[in-house]
Amino acid sequence: MTAARYVGQRVRRSEDPALLAGRGRFVDDVTEPRQAEVAFVRSPIASGRILRIDTSAAAALPGVLAAFTAADLAPYCPGWRGLLNWPGMVAGEQTALATGVVRHVGEPVVLVVAGSRAEAEDAAELVVVDYEELPAVLDPVAALDPDSPLVHEDLGTNLCFTSPFGSGDVDDAFARADTVVEVAVQTGRHTAVALEMRGVLASYDRDEHTLTVRVSTQAPQMLQTLYARLLGLPENAVRVVTEHVGGAFGMKAFVYPDEVAVVTASLLVGRPLKWTQDRYESLQSDTQARDERVTAALAVDAGGRVLGLRSEVVSDAGAYSMYPRGCVTEGVQVATIMPGPYRVPAYASSLRVVFTNKTPLAVYRAVGHPPAILVMELLMDEAARALGLTADEIRRRNLLAPADLPYTSPTGNVYDSGSHLESLERALALLGDDVGDRRRDAERRGRLLGVGFSSFVELSAPGAMFYGAKGAPITAHDQVEVTVQPDGSVTVLLGTPGQGQGLHTTAAQVVADALGVRLDDVRVVSGDTRVVPHGSGVWASRSAVVSVGAAHAAATEVRRRLLVLAAHLFEADPDDVELVDGVVGVRGVPASRTGVAEVAAVAYWGTHRLPADVEVGLGAVGSYSGPPYTFNNGTHVAVVEVERATGLVRVVDYAVVEDCGVLVNPDIVDGQIRGGVAQGLGGALLEHVVLDPIGQPQTSTLLDYLLPTAVDVPDIRIEHIETPAPTTTLGTKGVGEAGTAGAPAAIHCAVNDALAREGARVWRQPIRPEDVLAALTAER
Amino acid sequence: MTRDPVRVTLRVNGRPETGWAEPRTTLADFLRQELGLTGTHVGCEQGVCGACTVVLDGAAVRSCLVFAVQADGCAVETVEGLAGEGAPGREAVHPLQTAFREASAVQCGFCTPGFLMTALVALRERDDWDRAALRERLGGNLCRCTGYQTVVDAVLAAAPEVRALEGEGGRR
Ligand code: FES
Ligand code: FES
């Protein structure tokens, strides 16, 4: 065995030089000969019937090649429903362009093709669409009223999905409780805002009957399959290319109607078609998230030990269940993750997912975890206040200890390993013991200081049961192909592309170690379905488990074959041959040492020297499908200052203790955590898709939809605990979403800690200054 | 208003460049589409995200808010010119680029060119930024991936070398 040399190291990223030089290849950076461009006419209203579409003036404009409506595309591309076989789930049909009815502002209605984007936009302005405006369904609770208008008439209901979750005798738990606390929490609708907007460049080859789609996505093979299905093409005729992706965060893991419309139109127009979204479109048509209303109650005994938990979750799905992940995952995770890292003997939750006339809600980084963790942590703090315990003490009394593991949560999640209690103690140490001084100092400056904890588990690297078994083309596996070339250099073909997190670097580290070669000799390629083996995409914090597992499997197989070949050349037993630092030799025979290149050359160009039973070539495809999921865990601690005069909240200190198992590249992991915390901070304090009473978006620019800036996000101190996952190849657990999962709760708990000194609290996110002021005023 | 394209001539990264632009064409689109300099990214076209930041006659500007015709006759610096010329296999690297890589300040890299150009101008002004002031200065550039800390680290780390390289007032 070679000792790990690169895994665990802060290796510099191989992705960086091109990106730093401005030589990235994002979709919009690539231009095809004779490329034409697309602009959309989108619905300006939340709900209505399309009475008439007139594209004649648009089509007559110079430079315009085509203007398509739903009727034009329907013969080539049928509609689809974002249905997963959750019992009782229903979903309305979605089409590339709106068919007869519009169900949210921003839904694409007409696609215009012209020589340039500017011409296409000019033409789009000339398209006339007459609507009969219908009352919009905007409140998910009112939407359940039998008299409510329906988002999808044919479904006969706005209720997409409902289900109970949990186990144990909750009634008994609450009957025995010494203290019961309740909260009603609402988290604001937000959206991913990947800095690179969505985009497509689609070309159809009329001779070969092949379709090439360059697209900013997390899941190229999924799109390959679905484009083929929708357009009636064989999968070997569809090539999806994804080079650099400028952030995705779950939002780019779907079949988007506008993208499908561009792809379909490329068949009809016979020229490469490019569509690059603008930010106005992004804020109306990218999937949204976190629109959750939760009421919950916690029953504790006199010592603050949890006896039972109840929750009711209403999830606002928006207008469509986006294919293929659908719209229920967030709500399901809010309900099922809520018990978190605590001993919760009894839990009952009920979930309702409801259609409304809003942009579709779907998965976004940490899917459901932020509201779930937020509710649980707020309950913990309320219980602590009721009992006169500190925030850390009530957590200490309930967090899972090593002796509790493996632990099965009341929703059936199994935590096989972790450091739940230890992470809290380490976070306390990071916080330090000068909180009293900091409070007094803040007071002198007219500010209330608060400290908030968030102890959590995060589900990562989910297996096939998650979506695949529910009928979606999303599996848990990944494939990676590793080839040692004749000169000893190594090519790694990743089935799954990156979305900016450094997956090429991580995979190279693992392959270099598993093979026994130098990192510089490894080159990683991804993102072209014509070249790479199959993969399920980047999602759910899975790459460090699944892609890495597959890379390791492939490299291990190639190493085995290389050693067999070398053994033959050395006339030695394969068990006596070793490969270290790219040098092969017979153990204990220094004279035998030779470079990998010499052996590899024989595998390709010197096959006459090999007996018939030694395989030629040095490539192998490795696969990984792994356990049902892993759970990472951690504790965040946030320190905030609340300005009494303005209600403004500033996060002044932040520390993270994270346990995501074995670290492949600590810098990359830290980057995931910091970026994740920043997104969680955004959700807690800033980000909100605001609609007016008739469903008109009020947040159409990044001046209105507020993202955290360098001024808002503090320096974040990070400590790692490495409890290896017992079930994954390298003991990794995945970490991409952990920062986002934990941060909203830590910050919110800190704000409430500050406000509680004045008897006040807030219960909604984002926590706006006016809400803080209102809460403080109400108490005076 | 006429839509006819007009000739625009400017110095880009020290070289004269000429192209055609409609009066409404932004400098960002001109650089990307007419000159093929796609390192300048467009993240909002609303003047908010800073991804399109270039240096125009020494000032960091949002190229989505400047019309190409307004830049006629000006000197533009973009990310592509940051490092200067190198040789194949030995590409030149600017100290800011080195510092970003060393500090892990890049994730998806979409915001990165904008940060580099903003930072370049900031470091030409002074090399003694304190962390808080530098955060304010970078506050007009959005990054959705890194959480900013490592970007701040990188700019601070690059300060002495950039100052030495650029000299007072910059080299161009
Ligand atoms: S694209 Fe210019 S500021 Fe965003
Ligand atoms: S690195 Fe992705 S937006 Fe900054």
Image (cartoon, coloured by chain):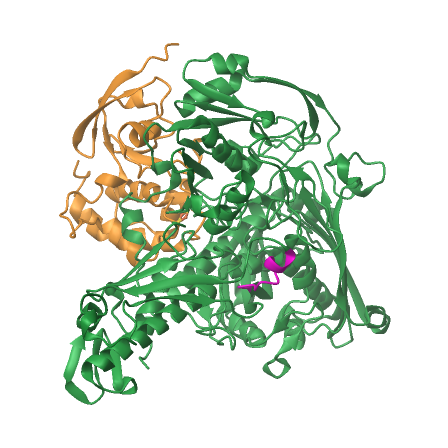
Chain colours: A green, B orange
Q: Is residue A51 left or right of residue A428?
A: right
Comparing A597 with A762, the one in front is A597
Q: How many marks?
A: 0
Q: Quadrant of residue A557?
A: bottom left
- Give above or below for A244 relative to A614: above
Horizontal arrangement in the rendering, residue B77 relative to residue A412 (left or right): left
Q: Residue at x 48, y 21 (%)?
A: A66
Magenta span: A460-470
* Quadrant of the image occupied by residue A425: bottom right
Residue A452: % across, % down: 59, 62
Measuring from the top left, give residue A346's x and y in whole percent. Answer: 76, 71
**Image vertical order of residue A232 relative to residue A757, above or below:** above
- Residues B64 and A602: in front is A602
Residue A637 visible in the shown view: yes
Quadrant into which the N terminus of chain A falls: bottom left
| A762 displayed left or right of B48 | right
Q: In this image, B11 relative to A305: left or right?
A: left
Q: Is residue A279 visible?
A: no
Decide: is A86 above or below A37. below
Q: Residue furthest top?
A: B1
Q: Main secondary structure of the magenta part?
A: loop
Q: Position of residue A699 (x, y in %)?
A: 57, 34
Relative image position of residue A267 (x, y in whole percent): 46, 32
